[in-house]
Each structure stands twice: as structure tokens, then as C-alpha cells.
Image (tube, rainbow, N blue to C red):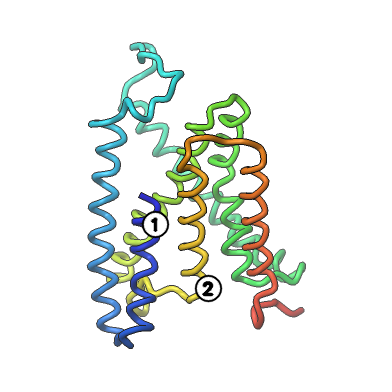
């Protein structure tokens, strides 16, 4: 699934470079790919939550009791949490810009790493807690699921939203460096998760890859913020 998401995000940039597509043609291609990605994401949810949910329950799966609450209550809590996170995110984005300027950080580095880490802190904490309890299946599902959600849902929704809001239509033709990182991330994830085993050395390698990506963005020429 992650490789499919990577293809959907990489192909527009490759099409632009190879075919020299016009802005209008690139926009149409991005909308068409967004439709495909959203359909696949909906089918992915059906697969995970309905038709094959047992495959994702893990070895510690227990039958749910009636005391655990209804779906409606869970949806209400999720909606309230989403609203609170959106409010806090607005405060964070407004406060992080002067802080980044003070430390001389580029906007690209802040957006790709600082905001990403803080915005997904809850998911990171849950994945780490699951890994500590030796629930590597759950930990990996959280990490990969978050990336799949961004690629298959968030990006296409932003494309469709740009059709009605904003000065111009958003396309999926990202810069070459970002495209390469997305592709490498998908390949590395597939390699790590392919054998179904985990150890501390794999964790060190993943952290090293993340650190290398961070250094690449931090030292990206022409993006440093000067005081």
C-alpha cells in the first residue's frame, strides 16, 4: 500500500519532467490520480476494518465486550479530539515561525520535520508504547498507517480543496528532492517490514535514515533563514 502511495505522488513529477506537461495538463493529471488514491484509501479502510479486520488484530486480540462503548461514543470522542488538535495546531503554527527564525531554521526544515514531529506526537508515543510492550505489529501498523493516510487521503483532499479555495489549483508534482525521499522511504519501509522480524539494529538503521533526511533538509542550499 505504501509503494502504491509513493507511485501516486512520484508519477506527476516524473510526467512533468519527461513530457514537459503544461500547468493545465498537470492539474488534470493530479485530480485524476487523486480520485484513484481516494478510492483506494476507502477500499483500504473497508479491508482493514470490515472484510479482513482479523488480520490486523494481532496475537493479543480479545473479543470486545459490550462495556467498551458504542461506535457512536467513539466517533464523538474522535470528533472532539480532532477539533481540539486542530485548535492547538493553529496555536503551534503561529508560535513556531518566530521561534524558527530565532534559531535560524529554514521553513522547509520546520515544515517537514519540526511540525511533522510535533503534529504526530500522539501517534509516535502510541507506537513507542506498543513497541515497548513487544507489540511490533501494532507499532509498525501505526507508523505505516499514518504515512498511508497522508499519501492516499490528505494529499488528494488538498488537491480537491484547492479547486475551490486558493489562488491556484494544487498539483502533485513535488520537487525532485522530495519525490526521491518519498520513493526511498517507501522502499526502505518495504525492506524492513518484508521479513516480518524486528531487532534493535533495524531500529538504529531507521533512525539513521531519518537523521540523514533531516540533515539534507537542514543544509539545503538557499533555504536557511537569516536574521
- The residue depicted at 66 percent of the width and 81 percent of the height is 221
Choose between 209 and 70: the one closer to the eye.
209
Where is residue 43 shown, x and y percent of the image?
A: 24, 44
Circles 2 and 1, Cβ within 8 Å, touching? The answer is: no
Residue of label 2: 177
Compared with residue 5, is residue 61 higher up or lower down, i.e. above or below?
Answer: above
Q: Is residue 119 above or below residue 183?
A: above
What is the C-alpha distance between the residues marked 2 and 1?
17 Å
Q: Is the residue marked by circle 1 packed among few (<14), some (14-19), or many (20+) residues within 10 Å?
A: many
Q: Position of residue 104 (x, y in %)?
A: 74, 72
**Residue 113 percent location from the top left of the image:** 61, 59
Q: Which mark is residue 19?
A: none
Query: Which of 128/116 is in front?
Result: 128
Residue 185 x %, y %? 51, 57
Q: Is residue 154 left or right of residue 121?
A: left
Residue 70 or residue 127, whichever sits in front: 127
Horizontal arrangement in the rendering, residue 183 relative to residue 47 (left or right): right
Residue drawn at 68 percent across, 69 percent down: 218
**Could you say whether the residue bearing mark 1 is in a helix, strand or loop?**
helix
Residue at the location (49% across, 69% down)?
180
Q: Is residue 200 left or right of residue 160?
A: right
Q: Is residue 139 above or below residue 189?
A: above
**Residue 114, picture quadrant:** bottom right
Q: Residues within 10 Å of mark 2 (few under 14, many from 20)?
A: few
Name the secondary structure under disc 2: helix
Front residue of 176 and 198: 198
Discs 2/1, front: 2
Placement of 72 over or under 66, stated as above or below: below
Residue beneath disc 1: 151
Identify the residue at horizontal 33%, vertical 70% (top origin): 162
Amino acid at each position: 500500500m505504501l509503494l502504491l502511495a509513493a507511485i501516486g505522488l512520484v508519477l506527476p513529477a516524473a510526467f512533468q519532467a519527461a513530457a514537459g506537461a503544461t500547468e493545465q495538463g498537470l492539474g488534470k493529471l493530479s485530480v485524476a490520480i487523486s480520485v484513484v488514491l481516494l478510492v483506494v484509501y476507502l477500499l483500504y479502510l473497508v479491508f482493514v476494518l470490515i472484510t479482513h479486520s482479523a488480520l490486523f488484530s494481532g496475537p493479543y486480540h480479545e473479543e470486545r465486550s459490550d462495556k467498551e462503548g458504542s461506535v457512536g461514543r467513539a466517533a464523538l470522542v474522535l470528533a472532539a479530539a480532532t477539533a481540539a488538535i486542530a485548535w492547538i495546531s493553529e496555536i503551534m503554527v503561529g508560535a513556531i515561525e518566530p521561534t524558527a527564525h530565532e534559531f535560524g531554521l529554514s521553513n522547509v526544515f520546520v515544515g517537514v520535520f519540526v511540525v511533522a514531529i510535533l503534529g504526530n506526537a500522539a501517534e509516535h508515543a502510541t507506537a513507542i508504547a506498543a513497541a515497548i510492550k513487544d507489540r511490533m505489529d501494532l507499532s509498525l501498523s501505526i507508523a505505516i498507517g499514518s504515512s498511508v493516510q497522508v499519501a492516499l487521503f490528505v494529499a488528494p483532499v488538498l488537491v480537491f480543496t484547492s479547486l475551490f479555495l486558493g489562488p491556484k489549483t494544487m498539483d502533485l508534482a513535488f520537487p525532485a528532492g522530495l519525490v526521491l525521499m518519498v520513493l526511498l522511504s517507501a522502499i526502505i519501509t518495504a525492506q524492513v517490514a518484508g521479513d516480518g522480524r524486528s531487532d534493535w539494529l533495524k531500529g538504529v538503521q531507521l533512525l539513521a535514515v531519518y537523521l540523514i533526511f533531516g540533515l539534507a533538509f537542514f543544509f539545503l542550499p538557499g533555504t536557511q533563514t537569516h536574521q
